[in-house]
Image: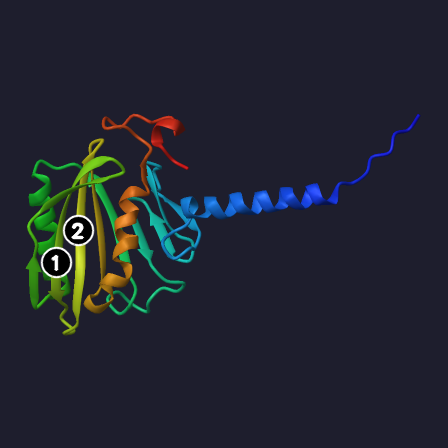
């Protein structure tokens, strides 16, 4: 004998409502501060990845990553209004992290023709749970425009990793939270000695 099943419409609606509520509650876990989705930016050698808003531009080359916090890239370096981030890697050197940071900043000062630069004291933080050092800089470019920049240095797994972010001074506060968030959304793929980590150890999502 065939049995007839009646469709319980009310039950289906209740299920849809519950699913919608769960999605709404989960959204803050996977989005950024303005509600947009996040995407992974992965080092070319797969030593690490970090998460940025989906709409941001990213370009990955060996030992070099550039990120721009907008839908389109500026015409040339130093002309954009949004946050620009550069991640550079090299084998570790013998100088201390703070000395390395100061050397990088001095080189940048010369190459960009800064006419003024005020450096903060070096402070400590963590990037993906690993010790890092930071120096903030208020500077004036050769063009006469004021910029604010932050240089963050991590020495790990036999590599020196420099994370540099900058915007015109008047725009820094607009992007500061997203720049800071990258350090918590940073996931290492190798341990402190350079050995590959299992996905669960990376802590990636």
Q: Residue 45: x and y, percent?
A: 34, 38
- Horizontal placement of 119 versus 41: left or right? left
SS label for mark 2 = strand
- Horizontal placement of 63 versus 2: left or right? left
Q: Residue at x 58, y 43 (%)?
A: 18
Determine whether 181 is above or below 76 in the image. above
Q: Quadrant of the C terminus?
A: top left
Q: Residue 139: x and y, percent?
A: 12, 64
Tell me the residue that label 1 is attached to.
137
Answer whether labels 1 and 2 touch (C-beta < 8 Å): yes
Reading the chain from its start, which is encountered first: label 1 or label 2? 1
Q: Residue 108: x and y, percent?
A: 13, 57
Q: Identify the colour scheme used.
A: rainbow
In the image, 194 versus 187, the foreground residue is 187
Q: Residue at x 26, y 65 (%)?
A: 77
Determine whether 23 is above or below 129 in the image. below
Disc on res. 4? none
Tell me the residue that label 2 is attached to.
151
In the image, 3 versus 194, the foreground residue is 3
Tag count in the figure?
2
Q: Residue furthest right?
A: 1
Determine crowd level at label 2: few under 14, some 14-19, many 20+ residues with C-alpha closer than 10 A: many
Q: Residue at x 32, y 69 (%)?
A: 75
Determine crowd level at label 1: few under 14, some 14-19, many 20+ residues with C-alpha closer than 10 A: some
């Amino acid at each position: 004998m065939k049995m007839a099943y009646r469709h319980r419409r009310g039950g289906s609606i209740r299920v849809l409502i519950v699913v919608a509520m769960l999605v709404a509650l989960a959204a803050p876990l996977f989005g950024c501060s303005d509600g947009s989705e996040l995407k992974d930016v992965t080092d070319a050698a797969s030593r690490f990845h970090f998460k940025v808003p989906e709409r941001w531009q990213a370009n990955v080359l060996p030992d070099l990553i550039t990120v721009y916090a907008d839908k389109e890239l500026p015409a040339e370096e130093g002309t954009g209004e949004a946050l620009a981030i550069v991640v550079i890697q090299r084998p570790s050197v013998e100088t201390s992290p703070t000395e390395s940071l100061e050397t990088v900043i001095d080189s940048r000062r010369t190459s960009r023709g800064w006419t003024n630069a005020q450096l903060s004291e070096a402070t400590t933080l963590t990037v993906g749970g690993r010790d890092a050092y930071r120096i903030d800089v208020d500077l004036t470019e050769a063009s006469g425009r004021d910029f604010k920049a932050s240089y963050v240095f991590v020495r790990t797994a036999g590599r020196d990793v420099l994370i540099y972010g900058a915007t015109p001074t008047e725009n820094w506060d607009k992007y500061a939270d997203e720049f800071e968030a990258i350090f918590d959304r940073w996931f290492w793929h190798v341990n402190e000695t350079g050995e590959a980590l299992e996905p669960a150890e990376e802590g990636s999502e």
